């Protein structure tokens, strides 16, 4: 199996994990937003990343304490941006549902997370055949996002006009406009995860000198980045726990399994991140440029499948469904174009 084919297969696995990670929250009905997402954050942002450092990175303190602290500070700064983006992302799911939130937020993240590294690190490649195919793939993804957003608006209108249509708790407490703003903010902040990977290359070089395996080198970036992301995220969760007086729900009868749901969400989310990091190292210097949009496209497609399975598009209407399917088609075209670009010289 060629390196490119293996990378594409792993990207699809990562997309399945990430596109599925939020699904367990739909079954934690007695908990509020802050209850389930705080458990997810502690597992996915802190416990699992540092466990992977302990497991796969020898001499971690020497790597982080090497000459010059600037690379570590850059990674930490990107992590704060990731934490803020995840706040908006979680609220966006509450406002617009899994399928539409993933389409808009992660779609924008796809565009920014690919274009910025391409311009910053590989500007000379933009006008080559490879660069143009990469840009074409990103454009396909962007078109897919637009169709998904339009489909979501049609869905909301149809559900509001359906007499007696049940509302999904907090999912209908925000207007489409508010939810759309949250998704856009999440999309702008989410690429900081990829930017940390791009600008944390010095830490990965130190890891290589310490004998860390190629597939594990990105773990030295994820741990400090996501720990920094956890800080603003947990501040917001604690604020909501106090405001909504929802801390007691952690001990409420019948919610013990919810802790497992939150932990599963964290494991799925960071598990996909580990795989993505390994794939970028396999792809070489263009790993973040190609890997990020491939990863994001896979996530959007999978999350929409879950949206259909969990009934988010029930009674949405034929017009909404047709536009969502067209959007998914463009996302697939973008995935294919990006995959082709990976095989070009």
Image (cartoon, rainbow, N blue to C red):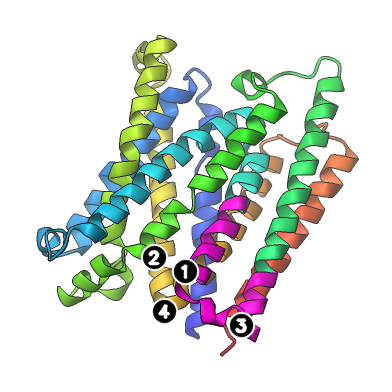
Q: Position of residue 341 (x, y in %)?
A: 61, 80
Of all residues shown, which one is farthest toward the right? 318
Secondary structure of residue under mark 3:
helix
Query: Which label number is shown at residue 130?
Result: 3
- Mark 1–mark 3 CB contact (< 8 Å): no
Q: CA distance from mark 1 to mark 3?
A: 16 Å
Of all residues shown, which one is farthest toward the bottom? 345
Q: In the image, is residue 66 part of the stretch drawn in magenta?
A: no
Secondary structure of residue under mark 4:
helix
Residue for badge 2: 198
Q: Compared with residue 151, is residue 286 higher up or lower down, i.e. above or below?
A: below
Secondary structure of residue under mark 2:
helix
In the image, what residue occupies the spot 65% across and 71% down? 135
Res 152 → quadrant: top right
Q: Upstream in the sequence, badge 2 or badge 1?
A: 1
Q: Compared with residue 87, is residue 124 higher up or lower down, i.e. above or below?
A: below
The nearer-to-camera label among 3 and 4 is 3
Q: Upstream in the sequence, badge 1 or badge 4?
A: 1
How crowded pointer 1 is (Cα within 10 Å; few <14, some 14-19, many 20+) is rated as few
Q: CA distance from mark 2 to mark 3?
A: 20 Å
Query: Which label number is shown at residue 120?
Result: 1
Q: Upstream in the sequence, badge 3 or badge 4?
A: 3
Res 96 → quadrant: top right
Left or right for 206, reference 151: left
- Mark 2–mark 1 CB contact (< 8 Å): yes
In the image, what residue occupies the spot 49% across and 59% down? 14
Q: In the image, is residue 120 part of the stretch drawn in magenta?
A: yes
């Amino acid at each position: 199996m060629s390196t490119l084919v293996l990378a594409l297969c792993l990207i699809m696995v990562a997309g399945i994990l990430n596109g599925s990670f939020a699904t367990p929250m739909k079954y934690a009905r007695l908990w509020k937003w802050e209850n389930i997402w705080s458990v997810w954050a502690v597992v996915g942002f802190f416990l699992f990343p540092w466990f992977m450092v302990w497991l796969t990175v020898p001499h971690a303190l020497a790597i982080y304490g090497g000459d010059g602290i600037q690379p570590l500070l850059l990674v930490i700064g990107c992590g704060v941006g990731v934490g803020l983006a995840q706040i908006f992302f979680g609220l966006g799911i509450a406002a617009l549902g899994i399928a539409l939130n993933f389409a808009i937020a992660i779609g924008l993240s796809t565009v920014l997370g690919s274009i910025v590294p391409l311009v910053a690190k590989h500007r000379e490649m933009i006008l080559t055949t490879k660069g143009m195919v990469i840009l074409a793939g990103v454009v396909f993804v962007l078109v897919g996002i637009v169709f998904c957003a339009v489909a979501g608006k049609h869905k909301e209108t149809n559900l509001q006009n359906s007499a007696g249509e049940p509302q999904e708790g907090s999912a209908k407490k925000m207007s489409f406009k508010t939810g759309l703003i949250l998704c856009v903010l999440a999309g702008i902040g989410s690429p900081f995860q990829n930017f940390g990977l791009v600008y944390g290359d010095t830490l990965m070089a130190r890891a290589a000198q310490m004998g860390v395996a190629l597939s594990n080198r990105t773990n030295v970036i994820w741990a400090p980045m996501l720990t920094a992301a956890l800080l603003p995220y947990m501040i917001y969760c604690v604020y909501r726990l106090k405001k909504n007086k929802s801390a007691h729900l952690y001990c409420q009868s019948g919610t013990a399994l919810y802790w497992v749901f939150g932990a599963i969400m964290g494991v799925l989310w960071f598990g996909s991140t580990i795989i993505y990091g390994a794939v970028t190292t396999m792809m070489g210097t263009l790993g973040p440029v190609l890997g990020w949009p491939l990863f994001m496209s896979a996530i959007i497609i999978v999350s929409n499948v879950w949206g259909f399975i969990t009934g988010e598009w029930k009674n949405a209407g034929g017009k909404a469904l047709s536009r969502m399917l067209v959007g998914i088609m463009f996302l697939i075209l973008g995935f294919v174009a990006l995959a082709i670009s990976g095989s070009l010289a």
